[in-house]
Amino acid sequence: MNDFEMDETSETNGLPKSAAEPGHEGPFQTLDVAHIALESANIGIWIIDLATRAFLPSPRTKELFGYPPDNEMSFDAAMSKIPGKYKQKVAAAIENAFTKRGNFSIEFPITVFGNNKYKWLSILGGCSTDESTSYFSGVVLDITEQKNNELRKSKFIGMVSHELKTPLTALKAYIQMLNTWAIKQKDHFTIGALSKVEKQVKKMLNMINGLLNLSGAESGKIHLNKQDFLLNELISEVIEETQFITSSDNIIMIPGETVKVHADREKIEQVIINLLSNAAKYSDKNSPIEISCSLIENWVQVTIKDTGMGIEPENIEKLFDPHYRVERKETENIPGFGIGLYLCAEIIKRHKGKIWVESETGKGSKFMFTLPVS
Ligand code: ADP
């Protein structure tokens, strides 16, 4: 099944009942002015009666889902327009908001113009309860244009980073050649200067690789170039590289079994560099950072442990979201874009592995990921 094919078999698991049952037009009549304003702004509204679970979409909501505004549209009919992969996410988000009586906001594509064309909708909703009524309601917006712009932006970032990477890779090779020559000449000044140039070039290459992966992740296309390799060997290389870039020598590898994996070496390298750099960035300089690699049945688990500032429980959930950064006094002056962990999560997901974190504020964090063993 491709990304946007529909899964006709899936059900809405006890979610709202069919919409326009007689007697359920009430809420729209009482909200006339707001309703008219929203419909003029091309924003659809919908209401679910929490007691009966009856679903009442406005005419604009029906149109946004590709149905005639005057016809009935049941909750299931709306859901049937959402491609399989997203349908479960939307149903889970609604069910979660239902049970927790909370808010939700979700973006998803719908198939409207035939098999290959789709548009993007955003739904925001929440519960409103007073003495007499109890409704779950919200709005629907067409965000196709915004999504297309995001896609154009990602493509542009991808193209520019790809172009920037080529000359930098050549520069790195020349630095290494010059370094070999300087060592032969015993020219200590040049050796020192080249080491600084190399550090900056490596930092730039890491950033560019991050941007390349970001553009891939945003357009849903992280291409994997898989090969067999020893994970322990890669970890040792990355430790050396990260210590060089972050000018620290406090990263310790806990010895473990030698593990062979079948994965994209460059992308897993990016994941480990990101996690180790974060461990260094969000800890006191020279506080210890441990990395270990252990076999658990058919999986290998990599653990990166620091004794830094830690993360509050309420932030843990959002940590792997794109552009999410924890806003607190201690992180104010630490630079970053909030894309590192999002990329790690996307790369690990593409490898069918898992990534998660355990943390205690003020004591430190433990980031873990798994990969299937070769
Ligand atoms: P960035 O570091 O560029 O902000 P990331 O996506 O790598 O972006 O991390 C997201 C947020 O998670 C960071 O802003 C930081 O607040 C928090 N974080 C990540 N790693 C750690 C860590 N090891 N210890 C404490 N906080 C962390």
Image: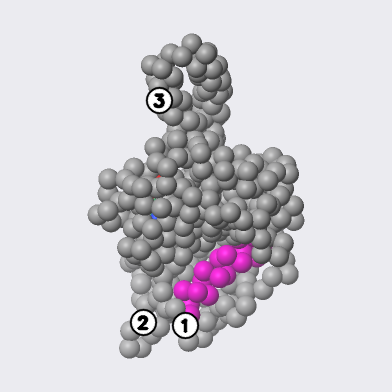
Horizontal side, residue 263 vs residue 171: left or right: right
- Type of residue at label 3? Lys
Residue 316 versus residue 293: which sits nearer the camera?
293
Considering only vertical position in the picture, is 313 above or below 193?
below
Lower position in the chain sequence, tag 3 or tag 2: 2
Cα distance in 3D space between marks 2 and 1 = 9 Å
User: Which of the colour schemes (rainbow, by chain, secondary structure, one colour) is used?
Assistant: one colour
- The residue singled out by tag 1 in the image is 50
Expressed as whole percent of the image width and height from the top left, the position of residue 343 reads 52, 47
Asked if the residue at tag 2 contacts the one at tag 3, i.e. Cβ–Cβ closer than 8 Å, the answer is no
Identify the disc placed on residue 20.
none
Q: Quadrant of the N terminus?
A: bottom right
- Type of residue at label 2? Thr
- The residue singled out by tag 3 in the image is 196
Residue 353 versus residue 193: which sits nearer the camera?
193
Expressed as whole percent of the image width and height from the top left, the position of residue 228 reads 73, 44
> Is 269 part of what is drawn in magenta?
no
- The residue singled out by tag 2 in the image is 129
Residue 108 versus residue 43: which sits nearer the camera?
108
User: Label 2 neighbourhood size at 10 Å, few (<14), some (14-19), many (20+)?
Assistant: few
Cα distance in 3D space between marks 3 and 1 = 63 Å
User: Label 3 neighbourhood size at 10 Å, few (<14), some (14-19), many (20+)?
Assistant: some
- Type of residue at label 1? Leu
**Magenta stretch, residue numbers:** 79-99
Asked if the residue at tag 1 contacts the one at tag 3, i.e. Cβ–Cβ closer than 8 Å, the answer is no
On whether ligand 1 comes within 8 Å of the CB at mark 1, the answer is no
Considering only vertical position in the picture, is 301 above or below 335?
below
From the image, state whether disc 3 or disc 2 is nearer to you: 3
Q: Residue furthest top?
A: 185
Q: To which quarter of the image does residue 33 belong?
A: bottom left
Lower position in the chain sequence, tag 2 or tag 1: 1
Asked if the residue at tag 1 contacts the one at tag 2, i.e. Cβ–Cβ closer than 8 Å, the answer is yes
